[in-house]
Each structure stands twice: as C-alpha cells, then as structure tokens.
Amino acid sequence: MISISEIDLDSVVREIAAPVPEPEPTQELVAKAGAYLERRGWMKAVAGEVDFQAAALVLAKCNVRKRCGIFVFGDYGCGKTAFLNAIKPLFAPVHFMPLNKPEYAEMLNIDDWPNWNADAMKCSVMLDDLGAESAQSDYGVKREYAAEFVVRFHQEGQGRLFVTTNLTGEEIAERYTARLTSRIKELCIPLHLTGADKRKWGAA
C-alpha cells in the first residue's frame, strides 16, 4: 500500500494546473478558410499576403475551438469591418452592432433594452469599432455600455463574441479597465491586421 509521503504532490499539482492545449486546425482547414474568404470578397489581392494568411489561420482556429470568437485590431481602414461582414454567415444567427452609430451602441444598455439583451445572449454578437461609442452618464455616473455587455456575455452568452477596434491594448485597458480586456482574451482569438488604409478618395 502506497503512503501519501511517497506521492510527489508537487508533480500532481503541476499536472492539474497545466493548461490544456488548444486544438489546432489542419492545413487543409486553413486552406478552406482562405478559399471561403476569397469567395466572400475578402481577397488576398486586397488584404495583402500577411493579413490574409493570418485571417485564414484565425478563422480556421475559430472553427475548431468551441465558443471562440475573434478580436480583430489594427489601424483605420485595414479591413476589420469587411472581415466581420465576410465571416458573418458562418456564425448565424448574429447580432451585428456598429458601435460608431449611437442608436446601436445604446441598445447594449440592459436597463433600456432588456429584451434585446436577453435575445443577444442566445446568439453570436459582433461589436464593430469598439471605442467609437461615447460613454454615457447615468445620474452623474459614467457608464460604458459595451464593457457592461461584454461582461454579461462572458457570464451568460451562448454564442460567440467578435470585436473590432482601432484601439491599442493599452488604450482599451485605460478606457474600460483590465476587467474587459481579461474577458475578451478568454472569449476571443486575436487577429492583428497590419495593412495600410484601403479606403480610397472619392472622385472629385
């Protein structure tokens, strides 16, 4: 009979605490993700080789990881919103929320829109342009509806969360606190798009 003194407790603790490795997609699945993006108009010729390959890999990872969304960040005009629009059909039903439009950002307030918020918890949600929304004042108390929504989604959401932003990690932490960034890290795979602004001037 083995005694407890003979058990390497440190080894047991290390084994229990060791993170479980995330499943990785096959190269075939990454190629299929790239082909899908091309068909949906998010093309390598426009996105650039580096961003396209990174996006295909992250999309494939999203496919094999349960309940994982994508956190897309980069400079203005690099294709973040276009990427979300391209992948939207894969994760239907989806609530797409352009946060630069006040009427959408205000819907994240559970006090005024409880039914919408309850419905959103059952679907995938895409928060486009995090940081573009204005903070609201509730009887003199500053409220960040997007941050409050992400915290609720982390606790109650059944779908996947997708976020785009022009903000840096430091800017997100400064505005919303580490509470939000911690939850986004848990819910999303990061995708950094590095390309230049693809928006064009209109005709004179």
Image (cartoon, grey):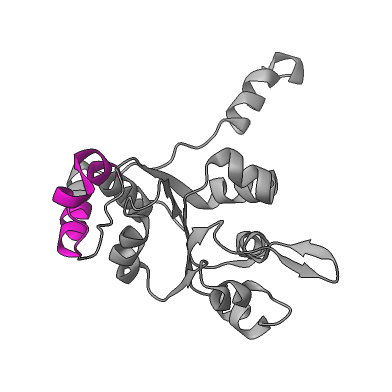
Q: Nearer the viewer, residue 13 or 39?
A: 39
Q: Quadrant of the N terminus?
A: top right
Q: Nearer the viewer, residue 183 or 40?
A: 40
> Which residue is drawn at the image coordinates 70% and 82% (left, top)?
112
Q: Residue furthest right?
A: 139
As for residue 45 lying within the magenta part, the answer is: yes
Q: Would you say 202 lies left or right of 116 here?
A: left
Q: Residue furthest bottom?
A: 115
Q: Nearer the viewer, residue 139 or 178?
A: 139
Bounds of the magenta segment:
32-54
Q: Would you say 185 lies left or right of 194 here?
A: right
> Which residue is drawn at the image coordinates 56% and 78% (left, top)?
103
Q: Residue furthest front?
A: 204
Give residue 45's position: percent from left, percent from top: 14, 49
Magenta region's main secondary structure?
A: helix
As for residue 18 lying within the magenta part, the answer is: no
Q: Nearer the viewer, residue 185 or 29?
A: 185
Q: Would you say 173 lies left or right of 35 here?
A: right
Q: Quadrant of the C terminus?
A: bottom left
